[in-house]
């Protein structure tokens, strides 16, 4: 394999340092896949310093040094963009369709334009004939239109990042009139084509989930909220099939006919799920989960291909719902 020239080595090192990371000579040796001697790396670091590159270092044990770029200097460097990075950025932008018509989409488009300006000439010419729709498409039926909620989304982002208490005017399902609550927004969640926000409702000492499209008005308050209790989405959603909690967690066991088993296998349905097959090739899904309308609807959607093995109360709940 052809060895790196010094120019190639220096450019590669600058690009790594410009990410803000710190490296020792040994770590740079690994980044070069052991193709450049450590002594050569050390000489290259000295060359960068002599060229007035704002490279800093501190001593470590065993005469080792840890190197990094001054923050102000690294912010003036442009990271190289390759084909994979560029396409990944466009795929991520296309995956944000739920934010269409909002300021989030505007920011994503602006970022994509800035990435365009970072493309090397040869890659720019190659990508002129490629459309992201040729590579990736995000299909989400029933996706909610949030173009009228751009202000609310931006307010929630500010409230979450600045840890500010907020006052929300919210219309609950099946209610005719909205009510006002004081909340502590923690995280925006996209689920099944819609946006929700996890909030801490201190009056009830509990985390609850609000549908963003039911928020009629949001006011950010001056008072900051404490990061207590600590928000952890895994803990908040434990035992939930979807977003909303149930009064009781049960161990359920479902049998799916082998004809449709591939629709169930290798997917995440719940943190406690256990998947196995019986001697006939049918798939058995077992998990501890709350019985909610979300779960009931999902079970019924499989029709004759899904059988409830345990417990009998799930079948009874289905009869109650329908």
Image (cartoon, rainbow, N blue to C red):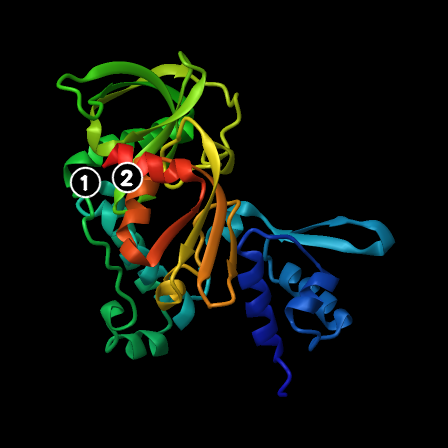
Q: Give the vertical position of 58 relative to 150 (above or below).
A: below
Residue for point 38% across, 62% down: 257
Q: Residue at x 39, y 30 (%)?
A: 246
Q: Quadrant of residue 87?
A: bottom left
Q: Residue at x 28, y 44 (%)?
A: 297
Q: Decide: marks 2, 1 in contact (CB < 8 A)?
A: yes
Could you say where residue 73 lies in the image, as x and y percent from the top left?
A: 52, 51
N-terminal of the pair, mark 2 or mark 1, is: 1
| The quadrant where residue 201 appears | top left
- Residue located beneath label 1 in the image: 146
Question: Callout 1: helix, strand or loop?
Answer: loop
Residue 118 location (% of width, % of height): 37, 64
Q: Nearer the viewer, residue 48 or 3?
A: 3
Residue sticking out furthest to the top: 203
- Which residue is found at the position 28% from the left and 36% from the top? 319
User: For the C terminus, which image quadrant?
Assistant: top left
Along the line of sight, which residue is nearer the eye, 304 or 218?
A: 304
Seen in the picture, residue 1 relative to 200 is either above or below; the reply is below
Q: Most extreme residue toward the bottom, as rendered?
A: 1
Can see residue 262? yes
Residue farthest toward the right in the current orientation of the protein = 62
Q: Is residue 55 shown to the viewer in this render? A: no
Query: Which one is closest to the eye, mark 2 or mark 1?
Result: 2
Say whether residue 81 is left or right of residue 10.
left
Of residues 197 and 92, the one nearer the viewer is 197
Tell me the CA gap for discs 2 and 1.
Answer: 9 Å
In the picture, measured across the screen, residue 266 lies left or right of residue 213, that is right
Q: Position of residue 11 (x, y in %)?
A: 55, 69
Which residue in the protein does label 2 denote? 195
């Amino acid at each position: 394999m052809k060895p790196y020239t010094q120019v190639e080595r220096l450019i590669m090192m600058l690009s790594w340092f410009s990410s803000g990371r710190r490296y020792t000579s040994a770590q740079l040796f690994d980044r070069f896949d052991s193709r450049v001697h450590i002594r050569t790396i050390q000489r290259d670091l000295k060359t960068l310093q002599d060229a007035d590159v704002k490279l800093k270092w501190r001593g470590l044990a065993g005469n080792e040094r840890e190197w990094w770029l001054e923050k102000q200097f690294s912010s003036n460097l442009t990271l190289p963009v390759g084909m994979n990075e560029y396409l990944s950025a466009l795929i991520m932008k296309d995956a944000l369709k739920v934010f269409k018509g909002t300021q989030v989409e505007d920011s994503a488009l602006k970022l994509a334009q800035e990435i365009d300006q970072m493309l090397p000439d040869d890659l720019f010419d190659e990508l002129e004939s490629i459309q992201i729709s040729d590579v990736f498409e995000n299909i989400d039926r029933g996706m909610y239109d949030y173009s009228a909620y751009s202000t609310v989304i931006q307010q929630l982002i500010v409230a979450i990042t600045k840890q500010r208490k907020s006052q929300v005017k919210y219309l609950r399902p099946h209610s005719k009139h909205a009510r006002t609550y004081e909340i502590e927004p923690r995280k925006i969640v996209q689920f099944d084509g819609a946006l929700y926000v996890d909030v801490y409702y201190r009056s009830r000492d509990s985390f609850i989930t609000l549908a963003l499209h039911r928020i009629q008005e949001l006011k950010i308050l001056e008072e900051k909220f404490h990061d207590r209790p600590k928000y952890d989405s895994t803990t908040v959603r434990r035992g939930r099939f979807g977003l909303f909690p149930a009064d009781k967690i049960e161990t359920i066991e479902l049998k799916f006919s082998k004809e449709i088993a591939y629709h169930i296998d290798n997917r995440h349905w719940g943190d406690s799920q256990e998947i196995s097959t019986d001697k006939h090739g049918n798939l058995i899904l077992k998990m501890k989960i709350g019985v909610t309308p979300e779960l009931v609807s999902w079970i019924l959607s499989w029709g004759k291909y899904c059988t409830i093995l345990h417990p009998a109360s799930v079948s009874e709940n289905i009869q109650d719902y329908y």
